[in-house]
Amino acid sequence: MTIPLLLTLSPSQAHFHDAQNGTLIGTIEAGPQAITDQHFASGALSPIALERAIEWTEDRIQAARLQVPAGARLVTHAPEIRHLAEIAGLQGSTLNLRVDAVEQLFSRLVLQAFGQASPQDTLPYSPRVFASVVMLREMLHHLHFDGITIDAEVQAEGTSA
């Protein structure tokens, strides 16, 4: 049985709920605004800022000790994640952003940080986008998800959009 976990984002946290009953599974103290404020506040993207953002986010994921149920799949309605899926070239009301597409976004971000991205591969120059890529990549990697489904309609009982 596949259990859908709903990822909701606040400025400083990522919350994971059982999408069927709304039960909070856990919270990671690393939301897109917190990552932006901590590592990209100057608006500059550099290799050192990127590396520190990755380490900082990994530390918070590990500290959360999130217990992901076996067979869980990740779903969200977060606009930051939808924006990443659109940057990756996906379109539609329901989008499936696979881990390989997130890794491609991350590779583009790394090249951009080192000043080696071609113009067609450059991500929007937005600290919030930088933070969202780091956050999603690290969550998928460390929590062992193969992707995330973005659906504007998905919302668990007892959670707010």
Image: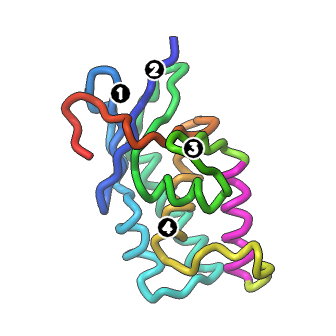
Check disc 3 and give the amino acid type.
Leu
**Above or below, comparing residue 153 to residue 1 in the picture:** below
Mark 4, residue position: 131
**Which residue occupies 56% across, 63% down?**
54
**Which residue occupies 51% across, 78% down?**
126
Residues shaded magenta: 101-114
Q: Earlier in the sequence, mark 2 or mark 3?
A: 2
Kindly report the distance in space between the C-alpha atoms of the residues bearing marks 2 and 3. Answer: 16 Å
- Judged from this view, the residue extending furthest toward the top is 1
Check disc 2 and give the amino acid type.
Ile
Is disc 2 in contact with disc 1, using a CB cutoff of under 8 Å?
yes
**Spot occupied by residue 105 in the image (x, y as percentages of width and height):** 67, 61
**Spot occupied by residue 97 in the image (x, y as percentages of width and height):** 61, 44
Image side of residue 100 versus residue 52, left or right: right
Check residue 84 in the rendering and tell me which mark sits there, or answer none. none
Is disc 4 in contact with disc 1, using a CB cutoff of under 8 Å?
no
User: Is residue 36 located in the magenta-colored stretch of the structure?
Assistant: no
Question: Is disc 2 surrounded by few (<14), some (14 to 19) or many (20+) residues within 10 Å?
Answer: some
Kindly report the distance in space between the C-alpha atoms of the residues bearing marks 3 and 4. Answer: 14 Å
**Spot occupied by residue 23 in the image (x, y as percentages of width and height):** 26, 26
Kindly report the distance in space between the C-alpha atoms of the residues bearing marks 4 and 1. Answer: 25 Å
Check residue 3 in the rendering and tell me which mark sits there, or answer none. 2
Q: Nearer the viewer, mark 4 or mark 1?
A: 1
Mark 3, residue position: 140
